[in-house]
Amino acid sequence: MLSISFPALPRAEISLDGPTIPAPDGSVSILDDPPNGNHIAIPVITVCVVVSVIFYSIRFYAKYLGKTNPADYLTIVAFPLFWVYVYYSYRLSWTSGYLVHQWDIRLKDIAAFSYVCWLATLLYLWLIALVKCAILLEWISIFVPEGKRSWFAWACYATCGAICSLSIIIFIMDLVNCTPFASNWNPLIPGGFCRFGIAEFGLASSTTNFTLDLIPLLLAQKVIWGLRLSWKKKLGISFIFLIGITGCVASLVRLYFSTRFYTSNDTSYYFSILALCSMCETTCAHLILCAPFTPKAVMGLKQTRPFARLKRYMTLKNDTTYVNDSEAFREAHELPRVAKPKPREHWFISSRGTGNSITYSQDSNRTLQTNAV
């Protein structure tokens, strides 16, 4: 998200009950109960929250069956931070609301709106950095053998460094931008001034974010198609990791509206759109982080006793040929022995494959071990 900056206003001309900016030609300020887009924003946020919770639950269950890695520690920090970010996303609807034109907001109400935007911006910077770095570290554990380093690993580490550096720079600039400190969200403080334009810097950061989203996705595809697997398995793995395209699309949409935010003085309206784009981008990042563990979670779920009993019940219900004294009936009533999940085994490594490892193509001597996850 981006902070909102407002032009300096002559003190004699300020009317706290008036609009923040003059209405454009052909429009009239509606200051009492102005129209807003909360009916759009709240369902979008809710869907993003539900999707994120579902896929985080899948990841946590899959990790419970296997071994942890450095990406899991970042995830543990990111997940509770996500809920704070969700709270402020909902809280924005309790102020002037989403998708409200700035000429429909009273000047005395703009500080409350801007304060929530400013806090959400800082939360977004840390949240998206943690999730993106967790994604890259997870990909290293998947595609690079433990204890070894490759060009893919170094590229991921470099991208993590770039993401962290960008987030830290923007975070510090957001904190020190305006003097006094409260001027970061309140344009009415006497003597307040800001050192740089938020819209210009926001456009630059959106462009950089889109580039940093695209590079790891292309690198992962190159590694996947270099694996010694059947064409169908390569296609399946590639499809799962192509979920990253959703994150790139969200970043691209955010970049587009950053240009509108840069060229328009209706900052409250376009910031609301950027806020929703940021929430969607964060949700896409959660999908990228958690979706590859869905098959493993499903396999682990199939090995539990409740699933075995449900399967037995459905078998008996659908097959009317069973009789109580038949051998088939007795076999169906026997619970299968639940196999203990193998630690750090990838779902796409078949037990009928080439043993305990899958190697890359001949131009690489690396080995994708079964304990990569």
Image (cartoon, rainbow, N blue to C red):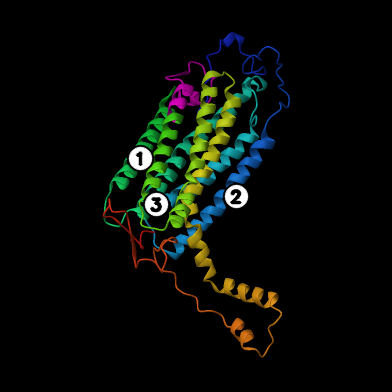
Q: Mark 2 to mark 3: distance in Å? A: 23 Å
Asked if marks 3 and 1 touch (Cβ < 8 Å), the reply is no
Instruction: Indicate the position of residue 228 as horizontal and vertical percent values.
Output: 36, 57
Name the residue carrying label 1: 159
In the displayed structure, 53 sits above or below 216; it is: below
* Label disc, if present, on residue 138 of the rendered structure: 3
Instruction: Indicate the position of residue 274 as horizontal and vertical percent values.
Output: 55, 31
Whether residue 61 is visible here, answered yes or no, is no
Q: Considering depth in this image, is 115 or 328 the residue closer to the camera? A: 328
* Label disc, if present, on residue 50 of the rendered structure: 2
Q: Residues within 10 Å of mark 2 (few under 14, many from 20)?
A: few
Question: Does the magenta run of residues contain 263?
Answer: no
Asked if marks 1 and 2 touch (Cβ < 8 Å), the reply is no
Residue shown at 58% from the left, 38% from the top: 89
Residue shown at 61% from the left, 9% from the top: 13
Q: Considering depth in this image, is 99 or 91 the residue closer to the camera? A: 99
Question: Does the magenta run of residues contain 189?
Answer: yes
Q: Residues within 10 Å of mark 1 (few under 14, many from 20)?
A: some
Q: Earlier in the sequence, mark 3 or mark 1?
A: 3
Q: Mark 1 to mark 2: distance in Å? A: 29 Å
Amino acid type of the residue tagged 1 in the rendering: Thr
Q: Earlier in the sequence, mark 2 or mark 3?
A: 2
Amino acid type of the residue tagged 3 in the rendering: Glu
Q: Mark 3 to mark 1: distance in Å? A: 13 Å
Q: What stretch of residues is rendered in magenta?
A: 180-205
Instruction: Indicate the position of residue 350 as horizontal and vertical percent values.
Output: 42, 65
